[in-house]
């Protein structure tokens, strides 16, 4: 049984596959808002849709019913979609968007790999954001996971071993490694105290990383404007508490001296998951 239905086969030349699925670690809505900005700025069309009845638990991700004057006029079901198109400069790309599957991850990653190979995908990039012991007063930075050390070194990575719960993006990354397709996950570091609110700088940094690694062009002007407003808002909130001011200064000292350790990152991720859930 196939997990997807192919709707179109646009002529794409070695497209970049961008993965931005909802439902896992996305501190500050960094990845969600980056994908929204990307979709708003590029021309795409649905290429394939996946069988959500098989992949999703609808009691966890319920469809939305539209009721007008007491009449049920229809349901809007969650969708997992592969979209194809190009950016303003003509670079071809595919975007995998929608909720992270609840079931059949191995079958899902195999299906995505099959589609990617059929379109000649040359590079896969996943977007995400995680809570980290970093201050909002310093520029947001990226860390990455990758299928090779060469790719990891292009972006920067957290040194040492790190064990954290995996999302489907990690499963896709490993699947593409086995297929011989280079894949990299870009992860924005979001101040842990701002992880539960929109943090537009994370979204801007992710899109700028996408440009740096893959050449996909996007306009981050609005995100940068929102990031400045967010920083000013956080400044005002923190100024009202001596304890918070001291915390930010401590984080500034730590970040200026060195990168937070993998153990500290893992601890923040675990706290975020306990407090926020998986987003499902």
Image (cartoon, rainbow, N blue to C red):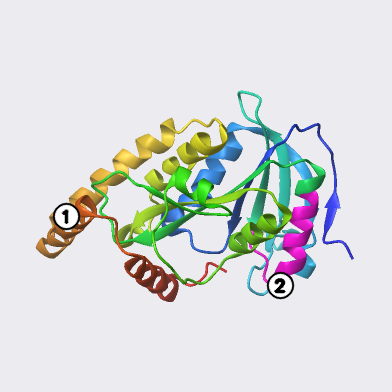
Which picture quadrant has residue 18? top right
Camera-near label (2 vs 1) is: 1
Nearest to the observer: residue 179 or residue 11? 179
Rendered-image quadrant of the N terminus: bottom right
**Residue farthest toward the right in the current orientation of the protein:** 1
Give the magenta part as a residue range. Answer: 99-115
Left or right of 266: which side holds 150? right
Residue 68 seen in this snapshot = no
Q: Does the magenta stretch include residue 108?
A: yes
Secondary structure, magenta segment, majority class: helix
Instruction: Please tell me how many numbered marks the rendered image carries.
Output: 2
Secondary structure of the residue carrying numbered label 1? helix
Number of residues whose C-alpha sits closer than 10 Å to that of mark 1, classed few (under 14), some (14–19) or many (20 or more): few
Identify whether 4 is placed above or below 221: below
Residue topped by disc 2: 103
Q: Position of residue 63 (x, y in %)?
A: 69, 64
The residue at which mark 1 appears reads as: 253
Q: Which residue is drawn at 72% across and 61% down?
A: 109
């Amino acid at each position: 049984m196939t997990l997807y239905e192919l709707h179109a086969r646009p002529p794409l030349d070695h497209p970049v596959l961008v993965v931005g699925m909802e439902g896992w670690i996305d501190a500050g809505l960094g990845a969600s808002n980056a994908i929204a900005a990307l979709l708003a700025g590029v021309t795409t069309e649905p290429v394939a849709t996946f069988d959500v009845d098989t992949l999703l638990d609808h009691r966890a991700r319920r469809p939305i019913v539209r009721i007008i004057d007491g009449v049920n006029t229809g349901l809007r079901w969650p969708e997992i979609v592969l979209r194809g198109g190009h950016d303003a400069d003509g670079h071809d790309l595919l975007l995998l968007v929608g909720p992270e599957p609840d079931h059949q991850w191995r079958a899902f990653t195999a299906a995505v790999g099959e589609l990617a190979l059929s379109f000649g995908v040359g590079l896969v990039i996943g977007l995400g954001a995680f809570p980290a012991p970093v201050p909002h007063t310093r520029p947001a930075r990226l860390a990455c996971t990758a299928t090779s050390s060469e790719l990891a070194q292009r972006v920067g990575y957290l040194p040492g071993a790190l064990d954290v719960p995996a999302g489907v993006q990690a499963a896709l990354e490993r699947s593409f490694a086995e297929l011989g397709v280079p894949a990299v996950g870009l992860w924005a570091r979001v101040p842990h105290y701002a992880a539960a609110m929109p943090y537009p700088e994370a979204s801007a940094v992710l899109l700028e990383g996408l440009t740096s690694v893959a050449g996909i062009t996007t306009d981050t002007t609005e995100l940068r404007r929102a990031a400045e407003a967010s920083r000013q808002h956080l400044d005002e909130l923190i100024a009202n508490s001596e304890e918070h001011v001291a915390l930010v200064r401590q984080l500034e000292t730590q970040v200026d001296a060195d990168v937070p350790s993998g153990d500290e990152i893992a601890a923040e991720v675990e706290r975020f998951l306990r407090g926020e859930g998986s987003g499902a």
